[in-house]
Amino acid sequence: MAPVGWILSFICLFAGLALRQDMPVGGSATLSMLLLAMALLACPMLWRGSPLGISRGQRIVVALAMILSLPLILLPAAS
């Protein structure tokens, strides 16, 4: 599970940084912040001992909520 977390963390980190540099659509700033937060949530090194009382299940639920809210962020930019 840790390699998947590392891969997802790096993908979200680089996507957030690239989006922060480019800013192609109206909601880019919000989307890049969500991607950077997702990189933080997916990083296995930071969450090894469950600091701050956040469990793995809570991190998964927050990550799913962030992924599912993506269309709501991009909807105003499309119109």
Image: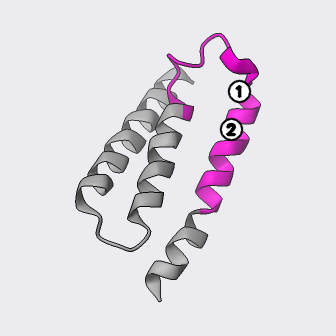
The main secondary structure of the magenta stretch is helix
User: For this rendering, which residue is in front, 40 or 6?
Assistant: 40
Give the residue at mark 1.
56
- Residue visible at 37% across and 35% down? 10
Does the magenta portion include 57?
yes
The residue lying toward the viewer, choosing from 56 and 21, is 21
Q: Which quarter of the figure has residue 54?
A: top right
The residue type indicated by label 1 comes to Arg
Residue 18 against residue 47 in the figure, above or below = below
Q: Mark 2 = which residue?
A: 60
- For residue 40: magenta? no
**Residue 19 location (% of width, % of height):** 31, 56
Q: CA distance from mark 1 to mark 2?
A: 6 Å
Decide if residue 34 is on the left or right side of residue 13. Answer: right
| Callouts 1 and 2 close, C-beta under 8 Å | yes
Disc 2 marks which amino acid? Ile
* Mark 2, other Cα within 10 Å: few <14 / some 14–19 / many ≥20: few
**Which residue is rendered at x = 45% and y = 83% of the image?**
78
The image position of residue 22, as x and y in percent, is: 24, 61
